Structures are given as structure tokens and as C-alpha cells.
Amino acid sequence: MESLNIFIRSIFIDNMVFAYFFGMCSYIAVSKSVKTANGLGLAVIFVMAMTVPLNWLLNEYVLKAGALGWLSESFGSVDLSFLSFIIFIAVIASFVQLVEMVVEKFAPGLYNQLGIFLPLIAVNCAIMGASLFMQERAYPSLGQATAFGVGSGIGWWLAIVMMAAIRERLEYSAVPKPLRGPGIAFIITGLMGVAFMSFLGIQL
Amino acid sequence: MAAKSKNWQYFLGPLSKDNPVLVQILGICSALAVTAQLKPAFVMAASVMVVTAFANLIMSALRKGVPGRIRIIVQLVVIAFLVILVDQVLKAFVYDVSKQLSVYVGLIITNCILMGRVEAFALGHRPWPSFVDGLANGVGYGIILVVLGFVRELFGSGSLWGLRVIPEAWYVHSGGFYANNGLMMLPPMALILVGLIIWVHRGSNKDLIEK
């Protein structure tokens, strides 16, 4: 039940884009067509669903203060948490490499469309952010960490697909010249964020 | 003299015409998240400045020795190393701000400004210009952070750097006419403010306007 609560919260209330601004770079740059946005969003869901539980395990059994206690008594006092940045990013980077190879093999069309943004998932703050939030909030079980990872991924996918749909329509409207492109994208995201704030207070 | 003025151009470019946040649209996440108050915004800006400058310097010095295929991993290691240093220094000297910044210090690693500048500049230039470029991008990013922090703290909580600017007596609860704009403290307003800054910036730099 707690997992379900975390799952729903991370999609709607603590939405990666609207509440924490994670992954804004690729969010603004890739949200010009729904098809590409959808592909990138799905890749992000996959990477997040895999890396958050993996990093949870690493955090729980290697990095946390006293986490090495299972190895032997004498390691009980070791605190490696200062290494967590570099370990998390290594896990994420290798996973992204994997996704890149799979997409290249099975969906070359999508691969060409995503271009530079596929490897850039590695430096998509949303993914690193999810792992860091997982560490900071100290989810007590693997199930909850997984629910958080999948939910955050879905939240990000939802945001970028909605944004792309709006921007496709926006092509035909008369936006003031200096606002065209990123300017209006920011303002729309802000307004969507206001809308998403209405989910606040939902308690499962 | 010629080399000096070129470095000067590398420095001036990212401040306005080629600003990392407004024009290159890099590093937005942290630019928005930490700017509800001026002090964390300033600390964040300083940290990013240090990391971009030294990441560019180190990667530029290493650029001939690193094979192209593994360069992303090498970059991540160099950047992560610098960020860990910055994180430890912040924890040691300004612990309360470090707590406020929470995960966003760690997220400097994935700040697109870093990878973007290393890829676009440091790998093709000598160490000293790369250092200048990194520093200038850090400063350009910092300017936006400080402007956002200034506006959001002033209108959102009536103070600057934690000090009260709008007199207590003006507030409605003590018989005045003034109330804080709570929306300023919330995430959506940061996005809208950046949109407005981009509007003003492009309005005065006509050649940046799209289409």
C-alpha cells in the first residue's frame, strides 16, 4: 500500500519536471514532436526503473554508514557515502550505454531521431536526481524504491509527451517573436506546473 | 595582445550573447530549484563556476590522451571528482546552505553546462582558453541564478539574503497594506520568470530570435 502511495505521488504530486525541474534540458530540446518525445520518455522510464533499485541495493549494502557490516564485523564502522555520486553516475552511464545499443539494434529509426539525446540520458538530471532522492529519503524497502523509480519515470514521460503535444499545436499560433522557442516553452511548463499543483493534498 | 583579446571574447560571450541558461538552454534544473532565496542561489552559482572552470581545464589538458570512445566516462569521472570536493567543502564550511541545496549539489554532475562546455569547447581548445570559457559560463549561469534569487526572495518573502527588506509594519497582519506573493516561492513561478527573462533578453538581442 505504501508502495502504491509512493508510485502515485511520484507521478502527479512530486512530478520530476513540474516540482523539481529535473531533466529540463532534454525536456525543452526534445519536446518538438510527440513521436520523439514518446521514445525518449519510454527510454527514461526504462533507465529509471532499472537504476533506482540497483542504486538502492548499492546504497544499502555498500555505501551507507555501516552498510559493509555484512562482510565482516571490522567493516561495520566504514562510511562510504561520500562515494555515492560517482558510483550512482557510473551505474547510470553503463545502463544508458546498454539502452543505446538495444535501441540502435531494434529501432534504428528512433535511434536516428533521438540522435545526441540518447547518450545524454546519462546526464539527464532526472535520472541522477531520482537516485539521489531515493538516497536522501531513505526508502526502507526495495519495493518502495522501485515504485519510486518507475513512478518518477512515468511522471517525466507524461510531462514531456503533454508538452510535445502542446508545442505541435503551438506551431500554428502567433507567439510574440522574442518568446518563440524556449521562452514560450518555459511559460507553458510553468502553467502546467500550476495545474499539477492541484494534485497536492491527494492522500492515499 | 591578439591572444589576450580573444580570451576576453571567450569571457564576454557567455555573459549575455551566448548565455548558457538563456541561449544554450543548459543547466536549467538547478537554476530554477535553488533560487527561492538569494543565499543558496549564490552558493550554487559559485560552486558551479568552480566546477565548470576546472573541469574544462582538466579535460582540455587531457584531450590528446583520451580516446574518443571512452571520453564520456572520463568526463563523468573528472566532473564527479570535482563535485565531491565541492560537496565536502560546502558541508564543512556552510552546512546549513548545503542542507538547503540537498540533492542539487550532487546534480551539478549532471548539469548539462558541464558536459556541454567540455564537449563543445574544451576538447578543441588549449587549457587556458578552456579555463576562461568554463569560468565565463559559470559566471553567465550565476548571473541568472542571482537575478532569479533576488526577484523570488524579494517578492516571495520580502527579504534579501535572509535580511528583511520590506518593513514589518507594511504587512497586513500588522495593520499595513502589503502581502507576500506566495506564488513566487513555488516551482511554477520560477519557470515563468525564466520565460520572461528570455523574452526580455531576446527582445533586446534581435539576432537570437527564432525564425
Image (tube, coloured by chain):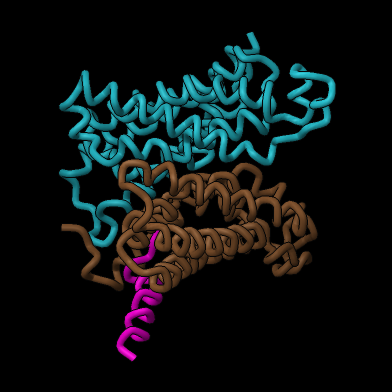
Would you say residue B10 sits in the magenta stretch?
Answer: yes
Q: Main secondary structure of the magenta part?
A: helix
In the image, residue B170 sits, relative to residue A28, either above or below, namely below
Residue A40 pos. (x, y %): 31, 30
Horizontal side of A107 relative to A127 (left or right) equals left
Q: Nearer the viewer, residue A148 or A181?
A: A148
Provide residue A30's location: percent of width, then percent of height: 28, 40
Task: Give whichever of A12, A41 is nearer the camera.
Answer: A41
Q: Quadrant of the N terminus of chain B?
A: bottom left
Write the residue at 22% across / 30% down.
Answer: A111
In cyan, which chain? A
Of B123 and B192, which appears nearest the observer? B123
Residue B209 location, quadrant: bottom left
Q: Residue drawn at (52%, 65%), measured in percent from left and top? A: B142
Q: Which chain is brown?
A: B
For the C terminus of chain B, which image quadrant?
bottom left
Q: Which residues are magenta?
A: B1-21
Task: Please report the residue visible at 57 percent of the width from the left and 34 percent of the height from the top.
Answer: A87
Q: Is residue B198 visible?
A: no
Q: Residue furthest front?
A: B65
